[in-house]
């Protein structure tokens, strides 16, 4: 089995686990090969996940749980174990991924993990771009956002993930995405695209421009940047990992 546990030290310190889950409820994003890690075998999913969760130490009091989909695709047995570990290791902040369509159900997760102890739940979601046309027609993520919806989203979501340096993007689009993310959300994660066998391709010139001309973002306490999918802690993790 590939690496499914890691930790990030420094300004974004946390422990990270990559768990298996049921298939992503959406599963149509053109850039995503992460869903290859999904499974319909609940026994296998739980077997892998329960071993991974043994790695958690609680040293930072912050845990990020990622899976190839949303927290709502994680089996009940695994969720029970996550909660048990969170309580035992005195985790104060817990990150989960969610897809946009689950926005009305976030309280289910918040209430579940706050049943016996106070835990701050922070949700992340992949918006990829605030350009509706590019997001829907190139990334095939069929979400339509206007300013009102972005504001409503920011009231429920702690941070958004942006996908940059793909062919067809422009510098202006990327700048606007970053500005919009920082305007409305507490934090953003910028993922610099790495070719992964999908139809979406990396734009090397945009990568060069971003690293040179947007380097001030690397010092921004609200911005986490993944230049390579093996970079930060979640970096360790190539999400096409299979058992």
Image: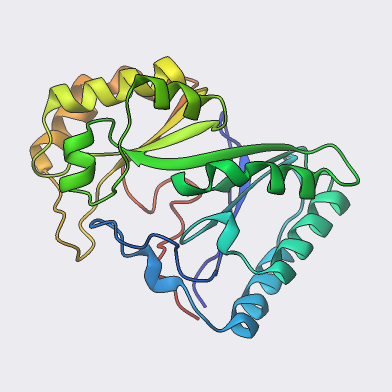
Left/right placement of residue 208 relative to residue 226 reads: left
Residue in view at x 77 percent, y 64 percent: 81
The answer to whether any part of residue 8 appears in the image is: no
Looking at the picture, the colour scheme in use is rainbow
The answer to whether any part of residue 21 appears in the image is: yes
Residue in view at x 39 percent, y 59 percent: 26
Number of callouts: 0
Image location of residue 99, percent across then percent down:
46, 49
Given residues 82 and 98, the one toward you in this image is: 98
- When asked about the image quadrant of residue 104, the answer is top right
From this view, report whether residue 88 is shown above or below residue 77: above
Residue in view at x 55 percent, y 64 percent: 4
Image location of residue 223, percent across then percent down:
43, 26
Residue in view at x 72 percent, y 42 percent: 110
Given residues 90 and 21, the one toward you in this image is: 21
Image location of residue 15, percent across then percent down:
64, 48
From this view, report whether residue 19 is shown above or below residue 135: below
From this view, report whether residue 84 is shown above or below residue 109: below
Left/right placement of residue 73 relative to residue 175 reads: right
Image location of residue 100, percent across then percent down:
45, 44
From this view, report whether residue 201 is shown above or below residue 34: above
Question: Which residue is at the far right?
Answer: 116
């Amino acid at each position: 089995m590939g690496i499914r546990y890691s930790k990030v030290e420094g300004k974004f310190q946390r422990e990270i686990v990559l768990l298996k889950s049921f298939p992503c409820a959406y599963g149509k994003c053109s850039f995503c090969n992460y869903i290859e890690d999904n499974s319909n075998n609940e026994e296998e999913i739980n077997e892998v996940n329960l071993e991974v969760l043994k790695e958690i130490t609680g040293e930072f009091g912050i845990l990020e749980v990622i899976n190839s989909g949303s927290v709502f695709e994680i089996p009940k047995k695994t969720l029970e174990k996550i909660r048990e570990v969170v309580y035992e290791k005195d985790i104060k902040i817990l990150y989960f991924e969610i897809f946009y369509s689950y926005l009305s159900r976030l309280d289910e997760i918040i209430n579940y993990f706050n049943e016996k102890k106070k835990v701050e739940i922070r949700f992340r979601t992949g918006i990829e771009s605030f350009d509706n046309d590019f997001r829907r027609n190139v990334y095939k993520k069929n979400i339509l956002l206007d300013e009102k919806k972005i504001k409503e989203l920011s009231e429920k979501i702690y941070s958004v993930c942006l996908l940059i340096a793909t062919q067809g993007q422009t510098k202006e689009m990327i700048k606007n995405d970053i500005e919009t993310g920082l305007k409305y959300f507490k934090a953003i994660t910028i993922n610099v695209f790495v070719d992964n066998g999908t139809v979406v391709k990396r734009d090397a010139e945009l990568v060069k421009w971003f690293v040179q001309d947007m380097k001030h973002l690397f010092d921004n306490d609200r911005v986490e940047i993944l230049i390579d999918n093996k970079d930060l802690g979640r970096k360790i993790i190539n999400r096409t990992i299979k058992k």
